[in-house]
Image (cartoon, rainbow, N blue to C red):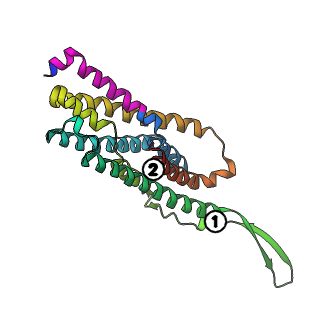
Amino acid sequence: MLAAALSSGSLRAMVWTAAALGCLHTVLGPDHYLPFVMLARAEKWSRPRTAAVTFLCGLGHVGSSVVIGAALAGMGMAVSGWSGSRWAELHGLRGAIAAWALMGLGAAYGVWGLVRARRGLPHRHPHLHEDGMAHVHEHGHAAEHLHPHRAGGKTWSPWVLFIVFVFGPCESLIPLMLASWAAAGWAGIVLTTAAFSVTTVATIMAVTGLLLVGVGRIPLGPLDRYAHAAAGGSLALCGAAILCLGL
């Protein structure tokens, strides 16, 4: 069956389509890379850590859809039966949950970032000494601030992102898996999912890395104190874009 599909070109077309869709759906969806860029800049992740987080989140993003698609293929679902099915509706519900989770994470992180930034702003206090001399001095409270997102030097944001990405579905992957199953069985599914997964994860990592290089060259100066707030806002906007625009 595999040899026949390869010789006819149908499976090869599916594999190339899967590879192209993996790259395209990642580039067109800023929620695939913007959260990593903003959080890496705000929390000053190292390059190895950023690469590890993006790789694991990308793997979780693709892997959850692969598991569902393989299960549906094993149950004998045809690609024609996917659209409008209860499984497709549940798949869409996963996307909505991921979008709302991203919005909630972004809103909470953004508010915390604003509070942190405001506490770090220098301000003045008048002081009156016993000898009657008065003076005004300027100081800030940044050093007094505790970091609730840190525990023992570790942050919770990568793990929350991982959970969000696992819930986030790859909409085009499951129909491709079902079509490749019909064309070449499990071998077809393996080839198609491998092509989609490799290009998706590679594109997430590549775009994130390139954007971080560009963002890192932008001097923020005093605005750097608002990096956490900006990161939270970008996460919330990504979630809203998924819900409103279907990105």
Q: Residue furthest right?
A: 132
In 3D space, how far apart are the residues under numbered discs 2 and 1 (Cα atoms)?
A: 33 Å
Closer to the N terminus: mark 2 or mark 1?
1
For the stretch drawn in magenta, the main secondary structure is helix
Quadrant (top left, top right, bottom left, bottom right) of the N terminus: top left
Place of residue 219 in the rendered image (x, y in percent of width and height, measured from the top left)? 66, 42
Residue 180 in sight from this viewpoint: yes
Secondary structure found at label 1: helix
The residue where tag 1 is placed is: 119
Camera-near label (2 vs 1) is: 2
Q: Residues within 10 Å of mark 2 (few under 14, many from 20)?
A: some
Q: How many marks?
A: 2
Q: Residue at x 40, y 45 (%)?
A: 53
Q: Residue at x 18, y 43 (%)?
A: 71
Quadrant (top left, top right, bottom left, bottom right) of the C terminus: top left
Instruction: State left or right for residue 110 relative to residue 127.
Output: left
Place of residue 30 in the rendered image (x, y in percent of width and height, measured from the top left)? 48, 41
Q: Was residue 62 drawn as part of the magenta stretch in this picture?
A: no
Place of residue 141 in the rendered image (x, y in percent of width and height, measured from the top left)? 64, 67
Q: Residue furthest top?
A: 7
Place of residue 179 in the rendered image (x, y in percent of width and height, measured from the top left)? 23, 30
**Depth order, front residue of 206/183:** 183
Identity of the amino acid at label 1?
Arg
The magenta stretch is 4-24
The residue where tag 2 is placed is: 243
Q: Residue at x 68, y 65 (%)?
A: 140
Instruction: State left or right for residue 191 relative to residue 125.
Output: left
Secondary structure found at label 2: helix
Identity of the amino acid at label 2?
Leu
